[in-house]
Image (cartoon, rainbow, N blue to C red):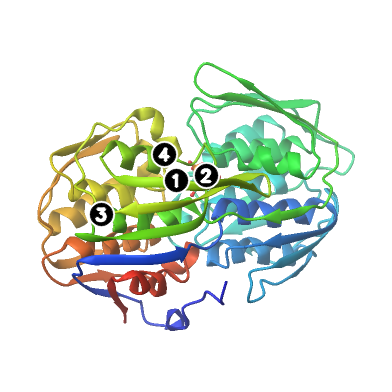
Amino acid sequence: MAQIIDSSCSSSTPIRFITQPRNKVTGEIIVPGDKSVSHRSIMFGSLAIGTTHIKGFLPGQDCLATMNVFKAMGIKIEGPDENQNVTVTGKGLHGLSAPEALLDIGNSGTSIRLLSGILAGQTFPSSMAGDSSLNGRPMARVINPLKLMGADISASEDGTPPVVCQGRKPDTKLTAIDYNLPMASAQVKSCVLLAGMYAEGVTSVTEPGITRDHTERMLTAFGYPVSTEETVNGKKISIEGGHTLTACDIHVPGDISSATFFMVAGLIAKEGQLTIKNVGMNPTRIGSINILKQMNGDLTVINERMAGGEPVADVIVKSSQLCGIDIDERDVPLAIDEFPAIFIAAACANGTTRLRGAEELRVKESDRIQAMADGLVILGIDCTVYDDGVDIVGGQLTSGTIHSHDDHRIAMSFAIASLRASGSLEILDCDNVATSFPNFVTLANQIGLSVKQQ
Ligand code: S3P
């Protein structure tokens, strides 16, 4: 893959997208590496004994923030090079050194929450904070279980960053817990499991619904024993403290969250066909495919194969007349990051799409229920907002100015919506697209959209 940073992303004034309507998308694209897997590959590589080689790393700002945090704790990390290869020279579970300053986490919720579990196990003090979006996001969900494990860790009074950890005394360990997750969150699950590596005994986490399982897969790939049993709604995952992570090679699949923008583009375009190659097909991540197929989307999954412990495939997308559906609540955690794009599909569908059980969308990089509904209403789409979801009545998108709320997925979703708008869209504050999808604009224009960044 070529170097995938859009050079025009380096402006110091806020980036906005200006789009024009287009009828057709066509071509073959490869989306960049999966964000969740890229974060974890740096974390596990740093805590492993030996050298980990990562292929297909996502060079987005979020994953680079994770990388910089581990560099600040004494880990040698080389790359990403122009082929997105990264090499991590791990120092083992107890090899990190104390950072000299506050750790800057940028916009990344995954980094701060998973790192909370890792830092709780260290014997040195540390503190983390990020940008204004991250500094407004809830951290009590990780602080509470870590405190139950005996960690001296805290956030601000209102439960937001900075997260400050005093470190455990050298001759003590964290205490293993049996934790029922209050919400279906892979970040909280992962945080507790990572802290569990530093605990005396077996730590278990029970999820209330299926959540992404990249942590469990990668623990296994690094040779750390982890056991999983099915429960009524999800899984119970158990980990014993004191084992070792051993370096391995990681092949990062293409990010299905990024691919979903182009699946929706291919479906809502009036004509055309698109192939998206090397898309991660982890069963805990394919909610968007399930939902878009139920909406009558013509998506064909081909070349299913395994790459680096994760299933991947190519997806062929054809222009389709979508129809509104009642989204199955079981698909919500499996499509949690894809709803902004799915809402655009709903706005272009015949009839009403109803989503419930998705209150977690309100505490993402923005309140994604409100931010998407506000943008769609500006474009003439009828939306009714609920605490835990939204009803969207499909219709004709008009033109207008959309606030992305500095949320990468809101910005990219409305850029895709331009295919069916009657006129130009101006999308404000798009800098954070670079957190997860640095070459989004290049790929969008390559397949036939008209997106200029200014
Ligand atoms: C992620 C888990 C999800 C998701 C986020 C990445 C992860 O968050 O929204 O983008 O890598 O574990 P929650 O755990 O809060 O649902």
* Label at residue 281: 2
* Label at residue 301: 1
Instruction: Please give left or right for residue 279 compared with residue 365 in the image.
Output: right
Q: Quadrant of the C terminus?
A: bottom left
Q: Depth-wise, is mark 4 or mark 3 nearer the camera? A: 3
Instruction: Please give left or right for residue 164 compared with residue 270 in the image.
Output: right
Residue 435 seen in the figure: yes
Secondary structure beneath disc 1?
A: strand
Instruction: Name the residue located 42 percent from the left edge and 65 percent from the top edge.
Output: 28
Q: Is residue 300 above or below residue 266?
A: above
**What's the amino acid at mark 1?**
Val
**What's the amino acid at mark 4?**
Gly
Going from the N terminus, do you reach mark 4 or mark 3 first? 4
Instruction: Name the residue located 65 percent from the left edge and 63 percent from the top edge.
Output: 102
* Label at residue 319: 3
Circle 4 is placed at which residue position? Answer: 287
Q: Quick one: label 4, few (<14), some, or many (20+) residues within 10 Å?
A: many
Residue contact between numbered discs 1 and 2, judged by CB atoms under 8 Å? yes
Instruction: Name the residue located 36 percent from the left edge and 57 percent from the top edge.
Output: 261
Q: Quick one: label 1, few (<14), some, or many (20+) residues within 10 Å?
A: some
Q: CA distance from mark 1 to mark 4?
A: 14 Å
Instruction: Name the residue located 38 percent from the left edge and 48 percent from the top edge.
Output: 338
* Label at residue 436: none
